[in-house]
Image (spheres, rainbow, N blue to C red):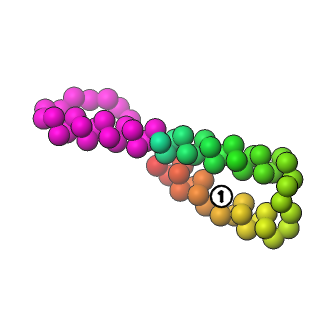
Amino acid sequence: MQDFKMSGSNMNELLTNMKAIKERIDDSYDELTRLMSRIESDKLWKGKEETTFMAYMGLMQQYHKSF
């Protein structure tokens, strides 16, 4: 997101809030990616449970990445 200045304290507050939301989404995406890697490498889940969970997490990862 590119930084820019706008007149009005409400617009500046909105920009600050949007940056904070983007940081949270980025952090969430990174955490989800680490979790998926750990599940795949540790091989703690097998079969349908792993397939179902990883499919759901894959969708969540795409959702987060779209932002």
Tell me what residue is drawn at x 85 percent, y 48 percent: 42
Tell me what residue is drawn at x 84 percent, y 47 percent: 41
Q: Is residue 9 magenta?
A: yes
Q: Nearer the viewer, residue 65 or 60?
A: 60
Q: Is residue 37 magenta?
A: no
Main SS, magenta region, reads helix
x and y, in percent, of residue 46 in the image? 86, 63
Q: Residue furthest front?
A: 44
x and y, in percent, of residue 37 in the image? 75, 46
Amino acid at dot 1: Gly
The quadrant where residue 51 appears: bottom right
Drawn side of residue 6 relative to residue 51, left or right: left
**Which residue position is annotated with label 1?**
58
Tell me what residue is drawn at x 72 percent, y 50 percent: 36
Above or below 13: residue 62: below
Drawn side of residue 60 relative to residue 11, left or right: right
Above or below 60: residue 48: below
Q: Quadrant of the N terminus?
A: top left
The quadrant where residue 60 appears: bottom right
Tell me what residue is drawn at x 31 percent, y 35 percent: 16
x and y, in percent, of residue 5 in the image? 22, 29
Give, as a single range, the part of the protein colored magenta: 1-23
Q: Nearer the viewer, residue 21 or 59?
A: 21
The quadrant where residue 18 appears: top left
